[in-house]
Amino acid sequence: MEGVKGKVCVTGASGFLASWLVKRLLLCGYHVIGTVRDPANEKKVAHLWRLEGANERLKLVRADLLEEGSFDDAIMGCQGVFHTASPVMKSSFHPKALTEEIVELAVKGTVNLWYALAKAQAEKAAGEFCTENKIDLVTVLPAFVVGPSLPPDLCSTASDVLALLKGETEQFQWNGRMGYIYIDDVALCHILVYEHEGASGRYLCSSMVIDHDEPYYEFNTSKITSLGFKFRLIEEMFDDCIKALVEQGHLFL
Ligand SMILES: NC(=O)c1ccc[n+]([C@@H]2O[C@H](COP(=O)([O-])OP(=O)(O)OC[C@H]3O[C@@H](n4cnc5c(N)ncnc54)[C@H](OP(=O)(O)O)[C@@H]3O)[C@@H](O)[C@H]2O)c1
């Protein structure tokens, strides 16, 4: 562990992305206040308590995005807040049951559009609030995240990867052409921009873009790589993901 650092809050701490962030923050020496909707839900939080440094420097508190003022206690006294809690679009939203292709496309498109719009609006609102209240806001925008899941229940994107590995490509194709990033790199990018005094604005984080197995185009990630960040390769993220899925009993080879 590095030297002991200050207190930070991670919202939605039990999630796929946040669990890795909590893990990395604890390893860096931070005191972490993690918010979850139900701290008593053993199944959802047990993996957090197993992290190195958790017994000494992790506290889980209850907070729900839908309840006003719910995060006040968690954030109080923290030097930084990593906000990852978000309702995440589930694959079950896919209107698979509908047989008419045109209806399916329209519904999928609408769900995608509204989800993307909601995320963009949330970021805009956060930006306006932070400017008004003189709070530094830095946004990390990861591509599709791949890697070992610390929570036992797979989030929607990890389930999509599992489906792909099982040959159920339809679920994955729905994601289309996109960039990929290793889950641990997402956590490390968050900490890098948090600790870097000159960091500001939005940071696009992606290792590589793939379309039908061929590199197609790349995102411009020079803003984060200019801070010294080096993304891990797509082979490594899938190798480690597959290994973890096998160990966790999700995948049988
Ligand atoms: N996974 C990816 O590939 C990917 C890529 C780019 C961006 N992102 C973004 O990263 C963020 C986290 O995604 P993830 O993949 O880690 O998803 P996840 O595993 O589903 O985590 C989402 C977390 O949000 C919490 N949450 C949901 N509704 C909430 C509410 N009403 N109040 C408080 N907490 C709530 C959940 O908490 P509970 O445990 O209480 O249910 C869960 O821990 C999202 O904003 C997502 O859009 C993800």
Image (cartoon, rainbow, N blue to C red):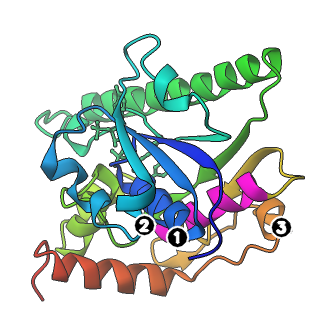
Res 182 seen here: no
Q: CA distance from mark 1 to mark 3?
A: 21 Å
Residue 175 drawn at (x, y percent)? 40, 53
Q: Give the crowd class for mark 1: few <14, some 14-19, many >=20 residues within 10 Å.
A: some
The residue carrying mark 3 is: 227
Q: Which residues are magenta?
A: 182-195
Pick whichever of labels 3 and 2 is earlier in the sequence: 2
Q: Residue sitting at 71 percent across and 17 percent down?
A: 129
Which numbered mark, 1 or 2, is in the foreground of this view? 2
Q: Main secondary structure of the magenta part?
A: helix
Secondary structure of residue under mark 3: loop
The image quarter in which residue 35 lies: top left
Q: Is 25 displayed left or right of 111 in the figure? A: right
The residue labelled by disc 2 is 53
User: For the residue marked with disc 2, what is the amino acid?
Assistant: Gly
Q: Nearer the viewer, residue 229 or 156?
A: 229
Position above or below: 23 against 121: below
Amino acid marked by disc 3:
Leu
Mark toward the start of the polypeptide (1 vs 3): 1
In terms of secondary structure, where does tag 2 sit? loop
Amino acid type, mark 1:
Leu
Q: In this orientation, which residue lies closer to the viewer: 178 or 89?
A: 89
Quarter where residue 240 is shown: bottom left
Task: Name the side, left or right, on which 251 lies relative to 129.
Answer: left
Residue 213: percent from the left, percent from the top? Answer: 46, 78
Does 242 lie within the magenta span? no
Indicate which disc residue 27 carries: 1
